[in-house]
Image (spheres, helix red, strand yellow):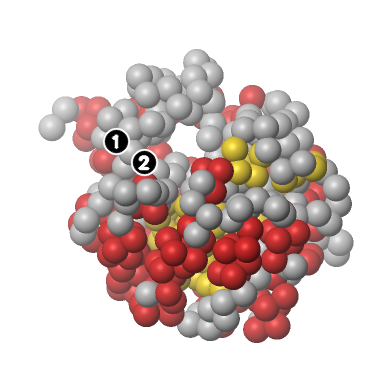
Amino acid sequence: MGFLKLSLLISVLAMHCLYSQTNNSSDENEIVLKLKSIKGQGILFGHQDDLAYGVGWEYIRGESDVKRVSGDYPAIFGWELGGLELDQEKNLDKVPFKTMQSLAIMGHEMGGINTFSWHPYAPVSHESSWNKEAIIVKHIIPGGKNHEAFKQQLDKVAIFFKGLKDKNGDQVPFIFRPWHEMDGNWFWWGSKQSTHQEFKALFAFTVEYLREEKGLGQMLIAYSPDRNFDSEETYLQWYPGDQYVDILGVDNYSDLKKGGSTEAAIRKLHIVINTAHKKGKLAAFTETGLENVTDDKWYTQKLGKVLADSLVSKEISYVMVWRNDGNVHYFFPYPGQKGAADAKELLSNKNILLLKEFKSLK
């Protein structure tokens, strides 16, 4: 074993030992308690950027495409942090970070749950997340030449999260879903751009630094590979360790597209659920959707079939579809769009929980 590989292994093991002794707070996290209390009573429905903009509108307080179609807000509000690490005023999708903070606090005070993804530009080189040729991970983990620059990026993420305070000044709990879809090859932290050990070191350090060094005790962590697994073993090959993860998830668009297999999507969710059960974690369908909702029965006949599976319906805590930007793409129908009635039908199902129903069960 080479010196660098040995050093990396020792670093990862040291972080595991230290962190396992200190990470005992997540079981009492407000979100964990809520999700455990309603488990089996329904699946929370979520939507990315729901309160910020939709098809034909933006930054109208209280507006929501999900509400326009279904009559109620989603229970899960998704947000994206990409660009924050470069001190940009707006994220990758042009949402001002100050507005995002305000809307996330609003979502929490409405009774919903916030979840954040992060498509960062690389430290130093500022390569886009979607640069598939860049080798970044080994240079930003402990011992890497750009590790200190990466810590500076995490400092900015921490400042943003610490700004999430309710009207009483208390920290707002949230889910953070870093380094998602690592089993694909489209991000610089993906399967062809880093080794399993390098990725685990990246994930573990990110969580440890934000929780321990920066004091983000209200943060839950979701692990969410894409659909490229067929067993518990392949699902966990990027897994950093139980002490760093609270929610086991999967992102899956492909199996729900035309020509895809809902049975395959269900099998993969079963792997997630069974693995979560063994580890005492929550399970979630962390990201999905059909771009521009080109199938007007997608919500009932694709997503609905997956969520109606007997095991999925009892064990999955939430599902989230991607964003609605009328200038780029949308993943939830807007009023008058051909799939709107079908989406409303799914969301009226007693097993799918929007915000009011979620609040009534808490």
Question: Regarding mark 1 in the picture, which secondary structure is present there?
Answer: loop
x%, y% of residue 166?
81, 60
Q: Which residue is mark 1?
A: 191
Residue most extreme to the top: 125
Nearer to me, 57 or 39: 57
Q: Earlier in the sequence, mark 2 or mark 1?
A: 2
Whether residue 2 is visible, yes or no, is: yes
**Disc 2 secondary structure class:** loop
Q: Is residue 261 left or right of residue 153?
A: left
Q: Is residue 28 above or below residue 102?
A: below
Quarter the C terminus occupies:
bottom right
Q: Is residue 345 left or right of residue 357?
A: left
Determine which quarter of the picture holds residue 325: top right
User: Which residue is rendered at x = 21% and y = 35% of the image?
Assistant: 6
From the image, tell me which residue sits under label 2: 182
CA separation, marks 2 and 1? 6 Å
